[in-house]
């Protein structure tokens, strides 16, 4: 059974940085596409960043390009999201997700993923 556990969320001021982590277990970590998603109150869940397992190619939502970096350490079964230059609009619950059947076209689509963590809260104050 796939399990994902996120950590690293915090309350920071605008312009600050955080590193979110997601530890996976119960599956071959390097074989699954992995993604970070976020959901703010009253909003739909949106894809923030994804990583393609075969090549390590990364994908980002336009709203976070240049500020967020997704990476993974297969030896530690850990996915990371480095978030820099945080803005109040980045405030949300951040989730990591794993999927065995994600395509390049849907890597930022939450419907492509089958396993989810419980989320870690990021709050950015102005």
Image (tube, grey):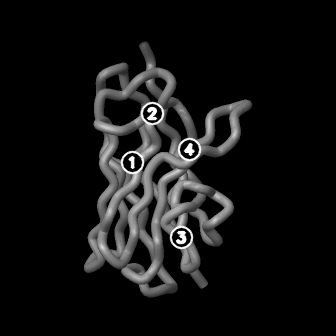
Residue labelled with disc 4: 38
Residue 94 image point, x, y percent: 52, 46
Q: Quadrant of residue 59?
A: bottom left
The residue depicted at 60 percent of the width and 84 percent of the height is 1
The C terminus: image quadrant: top left
Which of label 1 and label 4 is nearer to you?
4
Crowding near the residue tagged with mark 2, few <14, some 14–19, many ≥20 C-alpha atoms within 10 Å: few
If you read the primary sequence from the N terminus, does the residue marked by circle 1 or circle 4 appear first? 1
- Marks 4 and 2 sit apart, C-alpha to C-alpha, by 12 Å
Element type where label 1 sits in the image: loop
If you read the primary sequence from the N terminus, does the residue marked by circle 2 or circle 1 appear first? 1
Element type where label 4 sits in the image: strand
Crowding near the residue tagged with mark 1, few <14, some 14–19, many ≥20 C-alpha atoms within 10 Å: some
Q: Quadrant of residue 92?
A: top right
Residue 8 image point, x, y percent: 39, 48
Q: Nearer the viewer, residue 3 or 40?
A: 40
Residue labelled with disc 2: 63
Residue labelled with disc 3: 103
Element type where label 2 sits in the image: loop
- Marks 1 and 4 sit apart, C-alpha to C-alpha, by 14 Å
Which of label 2 and label 1 is nearer to you?
2
The residue depicted at 49 percent of the width and 66 percent of the height is 104
- Marking on residue 8: 1
Circles 1, 4 touching at the beta carbon (< 8 Å): no
Which of label 2 and label 3 is nearer to you?
3
Which of label 1 and label 3 is nearer to you?
3
Q: Nearer the viewer, residue 7 or 106?
A: 106
Image position of 13 (left or right of 98): left
If you read the primary sequence from the N terminus, does the residue marked by circle 2 or circle 3 appear first? 2
Image position of 112 (left or right of 62): right
Q: Nearer the viewer, residue 119 or 113?
A: 113
Which of label 4 and label 2 is nearer to you?
2
């Amino acid at each position: 059974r796939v399990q994902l556990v996120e950590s690293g969320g915090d309350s920071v001021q605008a312009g600050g940085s955080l590193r979110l982590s997601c530890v996976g277990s119960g599956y071959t970590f390097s074989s699954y596409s992995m993604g970070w998603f976020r959901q703010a109150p009253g909003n739909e869940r949106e894809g923030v960043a994804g990583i393609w397992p075969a090549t390590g190619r990364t994908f980002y939502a336009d709203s976070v390009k240049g500020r967020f970096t997704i990476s993974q350490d297969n030896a530690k079964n850990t996915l990371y999201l480095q978030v820099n230059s945080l803005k109040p609009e980045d405030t949300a619950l951040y989730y990591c997700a794993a999927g065995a059947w994600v395509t390049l076209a849907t890597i930022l689509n939450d419907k492509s993923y089958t396993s989810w963590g419980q989320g870690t809260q990021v709050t950015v104050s102005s």
